[in-house]
Amino acid sequence: MDAAFTEEQHEIRRTLRELLLKRCGPDEVKAAVRTPPGYDTQLWQQLAGRLGLPGLALPTAYGGVGCGPTELALACEETGRVVLPSPLVATAALAAPLLLALGSERQRTTLLPALAAGELTATLAVPGGQLTTALALTGPNDGDWAGGGRAGGIQARRVPAEGPAAPSRNGGQAAGGGWRLYGEAGQVLNGHTADVLVVAAHTGGFARSRTLLFLVRAADAGAARPGAEPGVPGLLRPRQTALDETRPQARLELRDVPAELLGEGDGDAAAVARALAETGVVAAAALAAEAVGAADTALARTVAHVQQRVQFGRPIGSFQAVQHRLADLYVALQAARSAAYYAAWSAGGGPEGDASEPGVGALALAQALEALRAVAAEAVQLHGGIGFTWEHEAHLYFKRAACDELLLGPVHRLRARAAEEAGLFPVGAGEPGGAPLAGRAPEAVEV
């Protein structure tokens, strides 16, 4: 493994860092999250147009930059430094890889160039708060994680077409027949503003239930009736209140919403599971790098504060107890950074183009989330009284750490899944009954 970055990768980091330092300070972040979209749309268009950020890991044939997971992770590390509120993770790390892997040629040529150019945004909707399970990060995604049986989750049913489908505004076909979705999904990243929703739903009835992915094109809102209010018929997606406002989330309510099957034919549940797992590796590396970037800035600002804050006639950073705490955080941060970089390199296939190593994404994400949690907590403590006020910038990182672990963790399940994938605990190694240790609660495993 060559751990050195190329000049092109360094340039991506430098350019993005310079732009974000000018446009995305703590005050700008707090102002952006209180807008209806939850992020600065002008800054997002600048990032898309000038740097091609949403298309960084997409092939040039579909309007992308033609880079890979490593470049996307480096970009996410820089956006994490300023806790940038944006649809980057939802669009580039979750939805776009699924469209590329499973979409028909018409779907790819219609949607991917628009996503790469920033003209459209997209996200992945998984019911029941099972995002990490769907991505095979905290457990196998071959079960009823999307809600099984006749009720629960999101259900898809096929309906007969009533005539030729009319072309939509973004070049696709408006669903006059095809599929209808019914159900709910919460904690959908950028779900209230995404133009394209990739929705996981069950179909096939109770006896032949299987999970497939469907496209809901919210960008076609109001196209059927001039002057109509934006919104797909039967679709409600209110923004949810979240502790971390820089990570906008929404609840999707679908009531017979027109949808299109992602891909061709009748769909392949096994291919969907594989594509989700592969997307999970890329997303985990990107999210781990984002957490590392946030932790790096929080630690740097804490070090600067303890060098200036005077107590007992000397800077508090000169006390050995404070130095030891900061040194421990630095070691944890560097370990998390190495794990995130390796996960991104592995997700790209390495120099041989091979598949990523089992569990590397989940392990890197666990390491990064744990490091961010520790750094953010110490940042609040070492900032003293000002650190305990919601208005202080330390809480931007504290909220990000708390909510990311709720959304993407918990950490012990990420590690257990990584151990299971790596075969660390073979089946039958646990108690009588054959249950593997990786599937047991942490307190049940003797070390």
Image (cartoon, helix red, strand yellow):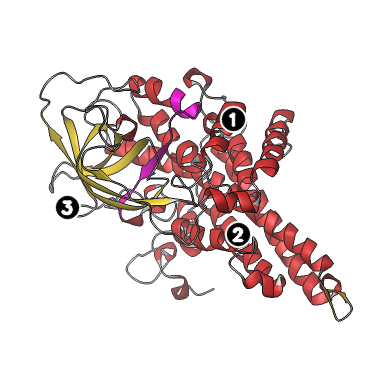
Q: Amino acid at mark 2?
A: Tyr
Most foreground residue, 207 or 294: 294
Query: Which numbered disc flags the more N-terminal residue, 2 or 3?
Result: 3
The x, y position of residue 259, in whole percent, is 24, 34
Decide if residue 316 is on the left or right side of residue 261. right
* Residue 120 shown in magenta: yes
**Viewport quadrant of the N terminus:** top right
Can residue 112 be seen by looking at this rendering? yes
| Secondary element at image label 3 | loop
Query: Which numbered disc flags the more N-terminal residue, 1 or 3?
Result: 3
The residue tagged 1 is 352
Numbered circle sitting on residue 183 = none
Would you place residue 37 above or below residue 244 in this image?
above
The x, y position of residue 245, in whole percent, is 49, 55
Highlighted magenta segment, given as a residue range: 113-127
Q: How far apart are the two marked residues, 1 and 3, measured between alpha carbons?
A: 42 Å
Q: How far apart are the two marked residues, 2 and 1, measured between alpha carbons?
A: 37 Å
